[in-house]
Structures are given as C-alpha cells and as structure tokens.
Image (cartoon, grey):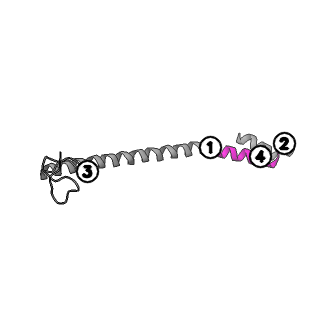
C-alpha cells in the first residue's frame, strides 16, 4: 500500500489526486495504529478487571474481619437480635417485641 502511495506521488500522470493520496496515507496510518489501540484498550480492560477483583477481595476480607471481631465481642450479626436484647437503633436497650 505504501509503495502504491509513493508511486502515485512520483508519477505526475497518476490517476490519484493529492487529496486522495492524503486520504490513503491517513488510512494506512490508522490501520497501522489499530492493533496498538486495540492492545491498549484490552490492557485497560484487564487492569480495570484486576482492580475490581482486588476491591472484591478487600471487601470480603473486611467482612470476614468484622464478623470475627463481632464474634469475639459477642455481638450478633447486624439486624438480628437475641430475645430481650437491644437491637440496632434501640439506644435505650429496651427489649424488642416478638
């Protein structure tokens, strides 16, 4: 393709105008850069996926640590109560009705 473009530039009797040659050059450059752009996009998607996985792992670890610390302190899971114990939002420690 580049050879054809060079030949068209050198030959004054070429059937291609200067504008057509410029368009061909731009198309060739775009085709040459496309694999790099695709590779860059794939790398970005991979990095985003890896970052998402790291955040999911961190969230799971924090949830485990909270559950372990709650168990160590004798607390029950948020939103559940033992009969007669104060539940979330019950600042007065009043027993909950069944």
Query: In this orientation, which residue lies closer to the viewer: 42 or 19?
Result: 42
Cβ atoms at labels 4 and 1 below 8 Å apart: no
Using the numbered discs, state the Cα–Cα distance from disc 4 to disc 3 in whole angstroms: 61 Å
Which quadrant of the figure contains the N terminus?
A: top right
Query: Which residue carries the number 4 mark?
Result: 21
- N-terminal-most mark, 2 or 4: 2
Instruction: Say which mark, if any, is on residue 14.
Output: 2
Secondary structure of the residue carrying tag 3 is helix
Instruction: Say which mark, if any, is on residue 17.
Output: none
Residue 23 image offset from top left, x and y in percent: 74, 46
Secondary structure of the residue carrying tag 2 is loop
- Residue in view at x 30 percent, y 49 percent: 59
Residue 60 image offset from top left, x and y in percent: 28, 46
Q: Nearer the viewer, mark 4 or mark 3?
A: 3
Q: Is residue 16 left or right of residue 94?
A: right
Label 1 packing within 10 angstroms: few (<14), some (14-19), many (20+): few
Main SS of the magenta part reads helix
Query: Which residue carries the number 1 mark?
Result: 32
Q: Is residue 20 left or right of residue 84?
A: right
Residue 69 image offset from top left, x and y in percent: 17, 52
């Amino acid at each position: 393709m580049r050879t054809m473009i060079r030949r068209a530039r050198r030959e004054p009797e070429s059937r291609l105008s200067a504008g057509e040659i410029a368009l061909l050059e731009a198309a060739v450059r775009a085709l040459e850069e496309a694999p790099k752009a695709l590779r860059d996009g794939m790398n970005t998607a991979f990095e985003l996926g890896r970052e998402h996985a790291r955040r999911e792992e961190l969230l799971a670890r924090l949830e485990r640590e909270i559950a372990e610390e709650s168990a160590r302190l004798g607390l029950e899971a948020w939103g559940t109560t033992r009969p007669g114990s104060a539940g979330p939002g019950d600042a007065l420690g009043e027993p909950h009705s069944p």
